Image: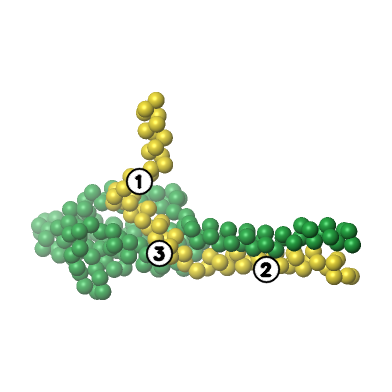
Chain colours: A green, B yellow
Amino acid sequence: MNSYLARTGWMRWLAPGLFGCMLAFAVQAQGNLEVDTPAISALKASMQKRHAQLAPLYASGAIGLAADGSIALRDASAVPLAQRGGISALVAAENADRGALYREVARVNQHPEWEADVRGTFAQRWIDRAPAGWWVQRGGAWVKK
Amino acid sequence: MSFFHMRPLLLAGAAAAAASACVTINIYFPAAAAEKAADRIIDEVWQTREAKPPQAAPAEEGARQ
């Protein structure tokens, strides 16, 4: 009887303890998404560098933030003819980086199938956070913020 | 075998079940965490905020000394 009491003494805490660990793990798993990897840092640096060239194009309305998390050439006439080729290449390079970023965030968090969700989340945040005057795609139409 | 002798076994089973439950938790896309991660990356790409405040603070302290 004595040993039974001793055993139940600590065992009584085992189930709540385990449950607590589970909750803590769940909260931690919900609270963070891993985005600090060399590949993601390289993509960020590349996009940050390109942004210096893209910023005036967002402001002029030549390019806009698309609903699918990419950027798109919206109004080529806002750019002199001679520069249009360069801008298409810039847009293509940015979209390649963005695609790689969404894929990498999903992959590094052990859920490659999250890529579309990551893309959707980013699409929403790029658009929400775009400053006034930029063009964004909402409900299939381009609107100026 | 009495129930009390079986109990550690049952508890081990429960612990294994709990551990497997932990693994399934993260199958759902963590939308709030993704939004936070997206904001951090957007800040850095657009330079809309000080990219790395935790690193900037010690540098300032070092400059003051």
Question: Which quadrant: the C terminus of chain B?
Answer: top left
Question: Disc 2 designates what residue?
Answer: B17
Distance between the Cα atoms at labels 3 and 2?
30 Å
State the residue position of label 3. Answer: A118
Q: Which mark is residue B51?
A: 1
Residue A23 is drawn in which quadrant? bottom right
Q: Is mark 1 on a helix, strand or loop?
A: loop
Front-most of B23 and A72? B23
Q: Which of marks 1 and 2 is nearer the N terminus?
A: 2
Please give left or right for residue A14 compared with residue A73 in the image. Answer: right
Residue A56 visible within the image: yes
What amino acid type should be assigned to the residue bearing mark 1?
Ala
Q: Position of residue A114 (x, y in %)?
A: 45, 66
Query: Foreground residue, B14 or A14?
Result: A14
Q: Mark 2 lies on which chain?
A: B
Q: Which image quarter holds the N terminus of chain B? A: bottom right
Marks 3 and 1 in Cβ contact (< 8 Å):
no
